[in-house]
Image (tube, rainbow, N blue to C red):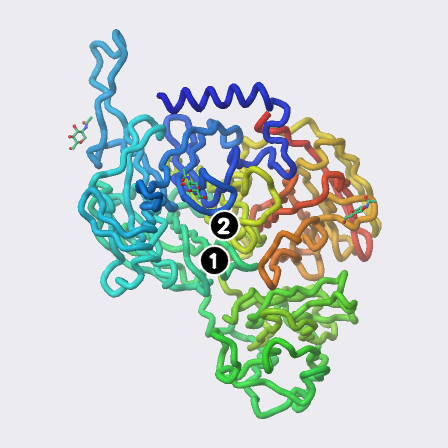
Amino acid sequence: MVALTTCLFTVLVGFGHLARAYYTEEYRPQFHFSPEMNWMNDPNGLVYHDGKYHLFYQYNPNGTTWGFMSWGHAVSTDLVHWEHLPIALECESDSNGNVLEMFFSGSAVVDVDNTSGFAVPVHDKKGRGRGKKKRYTKPMIAIYTSNYPTAHTEPGGAVIREGQQSQSIAYSNDDGLTWTQYEGNPVIESPPPGYEDQWNQFRDPYVFWHEQTSKWIMVAFLAMKQKLLIYSSTNLKDWSLESLFGPENARFGQWECPSLFPLHVDGSRSNEKWVLMMAINPGGLVPASGTQYIIGEFDGSTFVPDQADIYDPTQIPSGSIVFQDFESTSSTFEDLGWTATGDFVGLGPRQASTVDVWDIRGYLGTGVFTTYLFGDVAKGTVTSPTFTITKDYISFLIAGGSYPYNPLTAGTPDDNQVSFSLVVDGEIVHSQTGGNSEALVWRSWNVAGYVGQEAQLLITDANTGPLAHIHVDEIIFSDTPKDEANWIDYGPDYYAAVPFNGLPSDDRVAIGWMNNWAYAQNIPTTTWRSAMSIPRKMSLKTINNKLKLVQQPVSTLSSLYTRTLYSRTYKTLQSGQTNVPVPAPYNTRMKLTLEFKRGTVSQVGIILRSNSTNSQETVIGYDFLGQYVFVDRFKSGDNAFVTWQPNPYPGRFVATMPTKTTDVITLNIFLDWSSVEVFDGLGQVAITSQIFPLDDSADVKLYSVGGTASSVSVDVNGIKSAWT
Ligand SMILES: *[C@@H]1O[C@H](CO)[C@@H](O)[C@H](O)[C@H]1NC(C)=O
Ligand SMILES: *[C@@H]1O[C@H](CO)[C@@H](O)[C@H](O)[C@H]1NC(C)=O
Ligand SMILES: *[C@@H]1O[C@H](CO)[C@@H](O)[C@H](O)[C@H]1NC(C)=O
């Protein structure tokens, strides 16, 4: 109560002084959640209880970068307007200032049946509840990772090593306002037998009630081993290991923040599948942080993935044509019909084991293509012989530094690409760079729009900076893509997503952290750092014979929409740009829906946050020839804050989405000052990206390239601030 009063007082005083300035700092999101001040990362303990959505989150009460990790807390009745509450679990230090315990990521449940024994009688006010059955609290229980930076002995007697990670619980009998740590903490002190050495990489418990077995289930990770641990409990205090799962699919990075939840297949109540969702860092689709999912079955003990959702990196799709596997390590590129320039003249494929980088992995056979010769100093190109495109996909293994092909600088003195590209008609139509890793992973391009045309593959290393090399292997042509994993989001800024507990399976809403560890601590915001994604409702839908996790922003977001500010349909839209007049302030925060059909065009899209010369712009569109949705932030504004080399920030983020010529394509685009989230109409692809443009780059332009698009409609609603 004291804490609450103080907090309220601060807010009132603050409001008096700063009413106009509240949540209006440069880049401050207006309809995404962000903390009032200081650092935030993963969402934690998402739970719906008694009409309120509780959002806890990784929080540093003491600065705008990571540290002193605590659980911040906010509540909402609609997932749109949030009320900030006092810190729930605050980092603990000893009298010498040594941090004893940080509260790392975890989950929360409401123990309606008092399985934990933490429930207490409700002290009704005089006169209320008379003659009724005595009432009891429904304790809210947080299950989290205790990260112990200092060796010490816990009150319950556990002897803690410096850097240890264990699983602990705390309970609240006042709906999450005040918390008591369980005196028997930690409840799971160490990883299971065989993994004892992972005692400092054991984290992120996600707990839920499993109806069928009437047990609590916990999933947690051994982050560096890419191992999921599944535990069960009847009281949230005593846990037994049920099984282990992984590594599978995207695995060259730490696995963090798992969740496991059921969803109905195509809305059918009789057909339920389980989804394992997890964050991976580094090793995401774009460097570094990403989120993947695997669909399967769960019986209360074991997670069994659907075979269709397991991407064995050693298997290629049946019927594939191997164009080049780089196994002929005694040949030169010229012997193989390829053409080399610069430092690659006279060279050829290499034995991977002789490539002197610290940890080259994931290649097939023994030979690879590499631009790493005597360090990163090699520059030049290697071009394949001309071939005719006959199949819908080109897939390949790739690794190396992230230096994407940038059409603005390619061929100029600023060109720094280290990339693998497809050239059709003299134009680069697809390009892929490395993921800042030496582990080769599968990537694929849809080339259905180019079938019958002649093409060449081009490897370009125009750079001698750190990690300025790529490895390529096993280039195949196939009818289906050979991919690495199912990605939940194809952009750079969606991490550690977890769903709410306490909601029915058909109302499964998740929130992700809208940032990326590659630059999270340097983004150019002022008094706070990081925002959460729009809460997204998830479901399972069969699309092109494959079961997919699809997502849509929660419908309550529409309560912030203004009336329609712009609406226009073009029967045909010629190549070029057309101004979409959106009045301030909604030109920097809007929902824009773009619908169109193919016509003869190659690309249709929208340009946001641009200035009159287009020297600053964020481009979002659909490419019919490459069959992909994309967000391009090469020119989105500030990226000088990124300290990592190679800088993984600039880029075009691509999500393959095959369509037929007659299909109507819908893109729902949510712009909120310093971020864009893009969803196609079905919710099968999502791309989330932060952007840091200048204030007055606020023009909106419709564009098309390469012909006439048909039935193009644009609808814009402004989005009001949820904070003022
Ligand atoms: C805040 O950080 C400083 C060091 O930067 C530390 O001395 C202090 O104890 C921290 N305060 C809290 C409340 O953790
Ligand atoms: C909850 O369970 C504990 C342990 O069984 C018991 O001591 C306590 O009285 C229970 N609380 C309520 C309100 O029933
Ligand atoms: C457009 O933005 C750039 C920053 O990239 C800025 O230097 C330039 O002055 C702007 N041009 C106009 C016309 O606003």
Q: Is 204 left, or right, of 138 in this rendering?
A: right
| Disc 2 element | strand
Q: Which quarter of the figure has residue 6?
A: top left
Q: Position of residue 469 (x, y in %)?
A: 61, 73
Q: How far apart are labels 2 and 1 at the CA level?
A: 9 Å
Q: Position of residue 5 (x, y in %)?
A: 41, 20
Question: Mark 1 belongs to which amino acid?
Answer: Asn
| Disc 1 element | strand
Res. 592 in view? yes
Residues 390 and 549: in front is 549
Residues 119 and 453: in front is 119
Res. 266 in view? no
Residues 155 and 381: in front is 155
Q: Position of residue 717 (x, y in %)?
A: 68, 32
Question: Mark 2 belongs to which amino acid?
Answer: Tyr
Image mark for residue 495: 2
Is 472 situated above or below 592? below
Q: Is 469 left, or right, of 140 in this rendering?
A: right
Residue placed at 57% from the left, 83% from the top? 326
Residue placed at 67% from the left, 90% from the top? 346
Residue placed at 81% from the left, 57% from the top? 706
Image mark for residue 397: none
Q: Which quarter of the figure has residue 130?
A: top left
Residues 292 and 694: in front is 694
Q: Position of residue 55 (x, y in %)?
A: 43, 35
Q: Residues within 10 Å of mark 1 (few under 14, many from 20)?
A: many
The first of marks 2 and 1 along the sequence is 1
Q: Are marks 2 and 1 in contact (CB under 8 Å)?
A: yes
Q: Tell me how many marks there are.
A: 2
Of the 4 image quadrants, the one containing the N terminus is top left
Residue that numbered label 1 is attached to: 281
Q: Residues within 10 Å of mark 2 (few under 14, many from 20)?
A: many
